[in-house]
Amino acid sequence: MSHGKFITLEGVDGAGKSSHVEWIAERLRAQGHTLVVTREPGGTPLGEKLRDLLLSESMHLETETLLMFAARREHLAQLIVPALARGDWVLSDRFTDASFAYQGGGRGLAGQRISELENWVQQGLQPDMTFFFDLPVEIARQRLTASTANPDRFEKEDVAFFNRVRKAYQNRAEAFENRIKVIDSSKSIEQIRVILGKCLLSI
Ligand SMILES: Nc1ncnc2c1ncn2[C@@H]1O[C@H](COP(=O)(O)OP(=O)(O)OP(=O)(O)O)[C@@H](O)[C@H]1O
Ligand SMILES: [Mg+2]
């Protein structure tokens, strides 16, 4: 049975993920793939409701993590797994690396806890390729402030939080160097597209 590829985009808020989603999607369509473009938390009607809660309500750290994985379970069941089984490709703005980075690195939840949920919910399914948009947190903050009128619950966190998130992403990029491609997001959008284009040819 043909099986599509699963690509995810990661990085701190303001790193440039959303700026590249449509360009990557167009590039893959040009390569002949049918593409499903989605995001986390969210991607399904229920997941988008959970997203609204997650981005606005304060809650216990474990509640936050469980809701992220509840939304992910639904996302996998309703959208990701069926698409890949049809042979479509899936491009998601954030996935489980973000749980390790934000709930793990940023908020201090034990990685083991997150791994347990990852194993439960994903049953071994992992992205085929992940782009980690990396840049100094101060630059990401400046870009975000310039483009966002109403920051959400995560975007309101301080620089120290985002430095922990970034460090956790960097650690994962080292641990999974075959899957996670580190993109220097301080470069221009045009320069980044050249790098992304090369990576996409190798997948
Ligand atoms: N390489 C770049 N050079 C300069 N500005 C950029 C670059 N990439 C993105 N930006 C700008 O930075 C801002 C944040 O980018 P974007 O919304 O893509 O980030 P994001 O990673 O999706 O953030 P979030 O996690 O909050 O959704 C936007 O205004 C965007 O135009
Ligand atoms: Mg975005």
Image (tube, grey):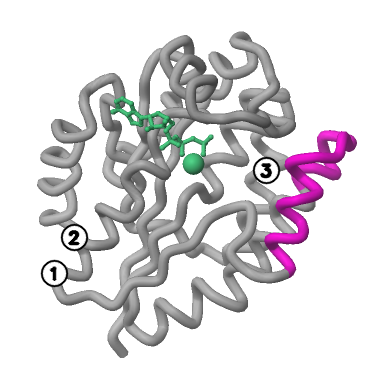
Q: Which residue is mark 3?
A: 114
- Element at label 3: helix
Disc 1 marks a residue whose amino acid type is Gln
Q: Are marks 2 and 1 in contact (CB under 8 Å)?
A: yes
| Quadrant (top left/top right/bottom left/bottom right) for the C terminus | bottom left
Disc 3 marks a residue whose amino acid type is Ile
Q: Marks 3 and 1, Cα distance to the nearest angstrom? A: 35 Å
Residue 89: x and y in percent read 33, 71
Ligand 1 quarter of the rendering:
top left
Q: Earlier in the sequence, mark 3 or mark 2?
A: 2
| Quadrant (top left/top right/bottom left/bottom right) for the N terminus | bottom left
On the picture, is 150 further left or further right than 19?
right
At 39% across and 60% down in the image, what residue appears? 91
Q: Which residue is mark 2?
A: 27
On the picture, is 134 further left or further right than 114?
left
Q: Which residue is mark 1?
A: 31
- Element at label 2: helix
Residue 27: x and y in percent read 18, 60
